[in-house]
């Protein structure tokens, strides 16, 4: 896998983005048809979002294609700059971010394995907002170093899953920005929640950190629009320095409402290649 990523990055930096997307789509379609396991898993996960069978099949296939585009843009971080952002990215809800920054109590940017979350963090950092994030380490150390080197090119500061949580609390108390993914749990600390009439495990971390520090949670997503273009969206803040939210469950429920809204609208941009729902 490591060498495939190295080759992918090499080719992505040589050829124009449009050519890279063309070949990425071919490989994605090939993967979709040849990998029955991945295809069936995506069908299963999206059956909670899409009821029509034909729409489900179309949506599942688009997931593979969009994920291949996601990888192309990740490989091309060396070409990512303010000119690219100005040309290909529009930003919505920036006033919510500025409002939260004014409070100086720390911000948790809460996203999901959705749209292009890696590129979203990169764009956010290049726009001049220093950002820390937590990422799952790869078993192959070479691959892990590959991902971290890519992230360092866009000035993202990355902590591995399992790092001392006291550090995150310190950063938030200092008014820093911490970017987290809130739709999948990779730790031993999760909460069972209801989404789309099913049940899943979501991480406690975002709600725990927010309630402990009084930080503001801002749901944020980088949505792909018209293949080559993106919309970086900042949703209405979830203020945790008031008495509105008294428990982690209440905070997570507020986030789920936002997440469900986007997943209903853009199901083909949610990347789930492992079974998501709990069997109850």
Image (cartoon, rainbow, N blue to C red):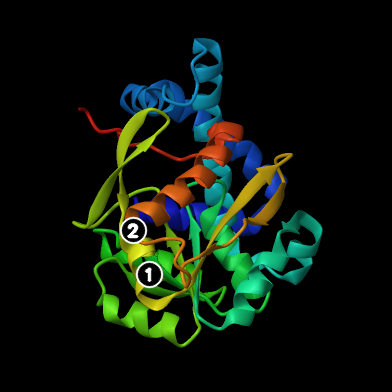
Residue 71, position as x, y percentages in the image:
52, 50
Mark 2 sits on what residue? Answer: 248
Q: Secondary structure at mark 2?
A: helix
51 left or right, relative to 249 = right
Task: Categorize mark 1 by other alpha carbons within 10 Å: few (<14), some (14-19), many (20+).
Answer: many
- Nearest the eye: 63 or 262: 262
Percent across and percent down for residue 233 are 66, 55
Residue at the far top in the pictured view? 53
- Element type at mark 1: helix
- Verify CB contact (< 8 Å) between mark 2 and mark 1: yes
Task: Identify the residue at horizontal 29%, vertical 59% (top origin).
Answer: 138
What residue is shown with label 1? Answer: 211
Residue located at (47% from left, 54% from top): 7
For label 2, the crowd category at 10 Å Cα-Cα, with few meaning under 14, some 14 to 19 and many 20 or more, is some
Q: Quarter of the image containing the C terminus?
A: top left
> From where the camera sits, is residue 164 visible?
yes
């Amino acid at each position: 896998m490591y060498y495939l990523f190295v080759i992918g990055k090499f080719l992505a930096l040589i050829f124009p983005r449009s050519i890279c997307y063309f070949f990425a789509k071919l490989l994605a379609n090939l993967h979709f048809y040849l990998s029955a396991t991945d295809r069936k898993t995506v069908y299963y996960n999206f059956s909670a979002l899409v009821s029509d069978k034909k729409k489900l099949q179309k949506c599942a296939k688009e997931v593979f294609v969009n994920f291949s585009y996601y990888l192309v843009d990740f490989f091309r971080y060396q070409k990512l700059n303010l000119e690219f952002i100005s040309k290909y990215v529009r930003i919505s809800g920036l006033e919510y971010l500025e409002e939260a920054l004014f409070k100086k109590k720390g911000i948790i940017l809460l996203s999901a394995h959705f749209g292009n979350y890696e590129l979203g963090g990169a764009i956010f950092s290049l726009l001049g907002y220093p950002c820390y994030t937590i990422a799952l380490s790869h078993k192959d150390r070479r691959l892990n170093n590959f991902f971290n080197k890519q992230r360092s090119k866009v000035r993202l500061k990355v902590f591995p899953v399992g790092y001392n949580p006291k550090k995150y609390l310190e950063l938030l108390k200092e008014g820093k920005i911490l970017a987290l993914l809130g739709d999948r749990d990779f730790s031993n600390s999760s909460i069972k929640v209801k989404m789309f009439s099913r049940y899943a495990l979501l991480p406690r971390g975002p709600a725990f950190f927010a309630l402990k520090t009084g930080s503001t949670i801002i749901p944020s997503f980088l949505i792909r629009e018209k293949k080559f273009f993106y919309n970086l969206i900042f949703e209405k803040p979830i203020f945790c320095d008031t008495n509105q939210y008294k428990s982690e469950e209440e905070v997570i429920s507020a986030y789920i409402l936002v997440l469900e809204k986007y997943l209903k609208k853009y199901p083909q941009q949610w990347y789930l290649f492992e079974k998501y729902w709990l069997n109850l």
